[in-house]
Amino acid sequence: MAKLSKVAIYLLLFVFFVNTVSAPDTVEGPQTPISPGDSLPTIPGSGGEGPGTPIDANTNWETVDLSGMTSDQIYIYFDSIPDWRFDELNQQKLAKALKKKYNIQELDINVGDENNNAEFEQDSFYFSNLDYLNVQQTIINNGVNVKYKQGNLTAEHADSVIKDGSITTNVEDLNAGSQTFFLGKADSLMSDSITLRDLKNATVKVKQQDIQISFDGDYEINITDKSFAHTSFNATEGSSLVITKTIPAYYNLSNGSLSFSGIEGPYGAFTETVQTATNASVYLNPSLGFICAFLMPLSTYAFYSFEDTRRDFAISIPQNSSQFKVCTRKDWVEKHDNNCNQCAIIDFVSKKIEMHGFVSYLRHHIKGSSVVSSSLQLFHISLPNASASFTLDAGFIFIPQLRISYTQQHPEISRTFASRYHTLYERQVNNSMHRFLKTNFQLPLSEMSDNLVYTYTTNYSDFDTTIRDNVVSQKAGSKVTVLPPNHPLIKKYLP
Amino acid sequence: MKKTKAQLSIFIVLGVLILIFLFIVFYYIYSSYASPDRLKFERSSIASYMQACVDKTSSDALKLAGRQGLYTAPKDALANVSYLLKGNLNKLPSQQAIEQDLSRYVEQHLLACLGNFAEFEQLEWSVSYEQPKASASMNLNDVSFSVSFPVNVKQQDLTISLNQFSVKQDIRLLYLYRIIEKMLATLQAEQAIDLTDMTNYNINLTVFPYQNASVYALEDPEHMISGKPYLVMFAVK
């Protein structure tokens, strides 16, 4: 008897199950089962429009098909579930309903217990608060004003967003598509040991091999790459940055600047920057800083010394140049091939800078122990097929020797602004290279700067030009002396 | 006390004697130098006397033209140094103009150097002359002056006639001129000095700023004038 009654119960349950499961085939939107006695719930945020359909609190959500419902109806179903009933099972049911309605392959949702507004349009749904939402592997935790529309997920705020193997925290103004996501503001984005901090107006694409970010505004983000090097990127309108998930990390930047600050540089604390109005890529060592940078025209590598600003310099690629490689040697074990075209080796260890190709070298104007220029100024420019080799003093400030060479003649191969007063340049005259000295005799004494280069020479001439205290001297054939203002020797000629 | 006074008197007397001695010595030297006695009424003596002035005035002309930017009487100058390039206008005088200028200087200053033959008159010689005509010529290694200066010197019924004087100043003015010519062309085109080109010469070039302009001083260490390297200066603005 007991066995029989058990079988009967199971039969009844089976019949009930069969009935309920088969129901969606027959139930269409407007014909959703509704208990006549239930009152019509109000629809927050809907303006009270739409007929709404009272539902039975005991509605079996697994049987509900939202795909044919109006947004109001979907809302009613959603809203009619009491909080206590929003258990895991009901979350799953809601997810299933949303997946079907909006044709989403993968969706998981946890609406939470907070007072919630929701809207469902034909092609979008909205929740004022969500504990959790996972749409096509874009996960929003603690989202506010979350909206899904045609594959795009937006949120006014999310405590975190997980997408494509990255986690972004404290996000404002999220707009996530299938490939990229826009962050109006985010505290951090982490992916594969790479951390980006203080993101603003950034569109991010996280791939297996790199993170790609494009920016829409002027601000700075801080980065820790996979080798734990700390960098910062200054973005402007239209900037973009790609960081590889490799060791060392490669940074590819467009229209922005990337900076690295180190404390163990060859001259103590320093900052290195690669700034580009076009495109540049850099890879770096977490303690030594930039190893090499590949700079397109209108890009600049700059070194700033915290200890002595007279040491600051930059290597800039002029507009009509081509891609230029700048490598630094800050440790004696580092080696770079200097037999190259369109490249520069900055050897802090041997205190030498070699530049080959169309490039400019910038320095501050200095006077005594002070810098007298507000920004780095053009000190030397080498034109195509020319090379310049700078030997620097122990402090990496003055240039005891500068040597120019060239592989192919050009109307002008180089120009060196030895000080504000003297400029030396190499120009072709009758098929041979000539050294010219241009002196700004109009320069007021108060604006004079010290000459940085002491001995200037070329590999195609056998004479040197020396400059000391802005007195140019050359002893080859003739003895040439060019004096600065108020030099005592002037009285010999004009007492 | 008496002893001290006596010593003092001796020193005073000695001092006075020394002064008298020195006066006599200087007077002798001066009078022997200035005395017309050294000028004898001889052709060679008079010619030599006049040649010395041709040498001096031509030398003065070269020194002055050198210091004043190739003009003995500069018109547009900075501290008497002519602008040879001003506002990109090349004002370098032609070789012929420089030669004429040097000639003119000699013509104008030769008589003054001769003191208008005052010494001749002191010696009671009568002098008649025509105005000197000078002709300077800039050569590669020197500057030659040829002065036509007909002079008749009479003592009683003897007459010495002199006519032609010439001198070669060991100054490479043409060499310097050509360097300047090239420098100015470079300055005009480049506002710069061609340091490579300067290796082709053997001069000393000193350039310096002066009152919002620049002054170029070319010295020829191999050719001295009055014991100093010959100097040509010019200004550029």
Image (cartoon, coloured by chain):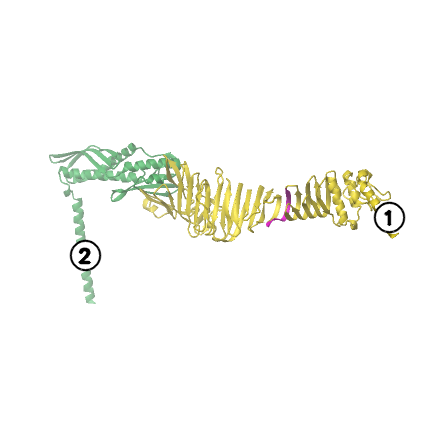
Residue that numbered label 2 is attached to: B16
Q: Tell me residue A71's x, y (percent).
A: 77, 40
Task: Give coordinates of residue A482: x percent, y percent.
Answer: 36, 44
- SS of the residue under disc 2: helix
Q: What residue would you read off at disc 1?
A: A8
Q: Which residues are magenta?
A: A180-194
Q: Quadrant of residue A244?
A: top right
Is A66 inside the magenta-drawn segment?
A: no
Q: Based on the displayed image, in which of its 4 quarters is residue A136 positioned?
A: top right
Q: Residue at x 17, y 48 (%)?
A: B29
Label pair 2/1, CB-CB below 8 angstroms: no
Q: What is the drawing colour of chain B?
A: green
Mark identifier at residue A253: none
The amino acid at mark 1 is Ala
- Three-letter amino acid code at disc 2? Val
Q: Which colour represents chain A?
A: yellow
Q: Main secondary structure of the magenta part?
A: strand
Task: Judge from the rendering whether residue A279 lies leftward or rightward of residue B67; answer left or right.
Answer: right
Q: Residue B85, how many percent across, how many down?
A: 36, 36
The reply to whether residue A255 is visible in this rendering is no
Label 2 marks a residue whose chain is B
Q: Residue furthest left?
A: B157
**Of residues A119 and B237, the one drawn nearer to the viewer in this rendering:** A119
**Label 1 is found on which chain of the structure?**
A
Nearer the observer, A132 or A47: A132
